[in-house]
Image: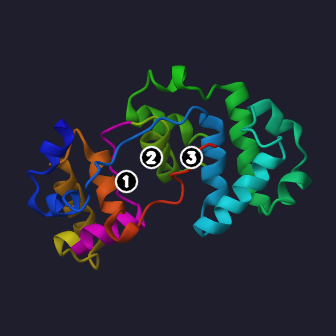
């Protein structure tokens, strides 16, 4: 595969790649609204708790991923009853409302460059840059995204490249310099960095 040949030029990253007999890949999520809602619901939670709340959310809609209009038809009290905070209830409803009013489907997002998608999504209160980057990677299967603010990515790069985050500005510059060599396949590099000590992001959710 072309991306593995390219990334393997980085000797240290190649060590992570060589640990896996099966190459890591990207898969598009069919439902962008559900993906974003699940991402918001899972933030700052363990994988186990996040999966429980996600399933409770699906159960509100007969076990199926709901349309944006269906989410808006549910009362905030019902959303709170599945374990969501008031803030997360508000954010989930913000996503659904934005989808109805502005559009959140593959046809619309696929026409945009990565930074344009991030700018578009972060108009939604409750969706930050990191969440938008996760959607680019795991929702839209974009191959060249580097999640510089992801704690798992940073920790893995500190270990693999012997970095120090004490000087934050210098640390970020070093991360960008290293990751620039991975382009146009930075997403795949992130996948292997996350797999260092199985440090995958919680928001890599899959629809049943």
Sort mark 2 into few (<14), some (14-19) or many (20+) by Cα contacts within 10 Å. Answer: many
Instruction: Kindly identify the residue that appears in the image at 50 percent across and 43 percent down.
Output: 135
**Residue, disc 2:** 133
Q: Are marks 1 and 2 in contact (CB under 8 Å)?
A: yes
Instruction: Kindly identify the residue that appears in the image at 59 percent across and 48 percent down.
Output: 127
Sort mark 1 into few (<14), some (14-19) or many (20+) by Cα contacts within 10 Å. Answer: many
State how far apart marks 1 and 2 are (Cα): 6 Å
Q: Earlier in the sequence, mark 3 or mark 1?
A: 1
> Magenta segment, which residues?
142-159
- Element class at badge 1: loop
Q: Earlier in the sequence, mark 2 or mark 3?
A: 2
**Residue, disc 1:** 147
State how far apart marks 2 and 3 are (Cα): 16 Å
Which of discs 3 and 1 lies nearer the camera? The answer is: 3
Residue 90 located left or right of residue 76: left
Relative height, residue 199 to residue 7 (above, below): below
Q: Quadrant of the N terminus?
A: top left
Residue 74 position by quadrant: top right
Residue 148 position by quadrant: bottom left
**Residue, disc 3:** 206
Relative height, residue 162 to residue 203 (above, below): below
């Amino acid at each position: 595969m072309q991306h593995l040949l390219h990334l393997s030029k980085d000797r240290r990253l190649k060590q992570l790649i060589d640990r896996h007999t099966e190459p890591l890949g990207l898969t598009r999520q069919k439902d962008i609204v559900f993906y974003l809602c699940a991402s918001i619901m899972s933030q700052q939670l363990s994988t186990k708790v996040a999966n429980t709340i996600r399933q409770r959310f699906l159960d509100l809609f007969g076990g199926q991923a709901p349309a944006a209009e269906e989410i808006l038809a549910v009362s905030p009290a019902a959303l709170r009853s599945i374990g969501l905070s008031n803030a997360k209830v508000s954010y989930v409803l913000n996503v659904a409302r934005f989808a109805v009013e502005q559009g959140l489907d593959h046809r619309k997002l696929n026409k945009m460059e990565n930074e344009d998608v991030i700018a578009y999504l972060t108009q939604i209160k409750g969706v930050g840059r990191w969440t938008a980057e996760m959607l680019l990677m795991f929702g839209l299967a974009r191959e060249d995204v580097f999640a510089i603010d992801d704690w798992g990515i940073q920790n893995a790069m500190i270990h693999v490249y012997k970095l120090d985050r004490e000087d934050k500005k210098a640390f970020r510059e070093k991360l960008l310099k290293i990751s620039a060599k991975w382009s146009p396949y930075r997403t795949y590099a992130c996948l292997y960095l996350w797999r260092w000590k199985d440090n995958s992001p919680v928001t890599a959710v899959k629809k049943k």
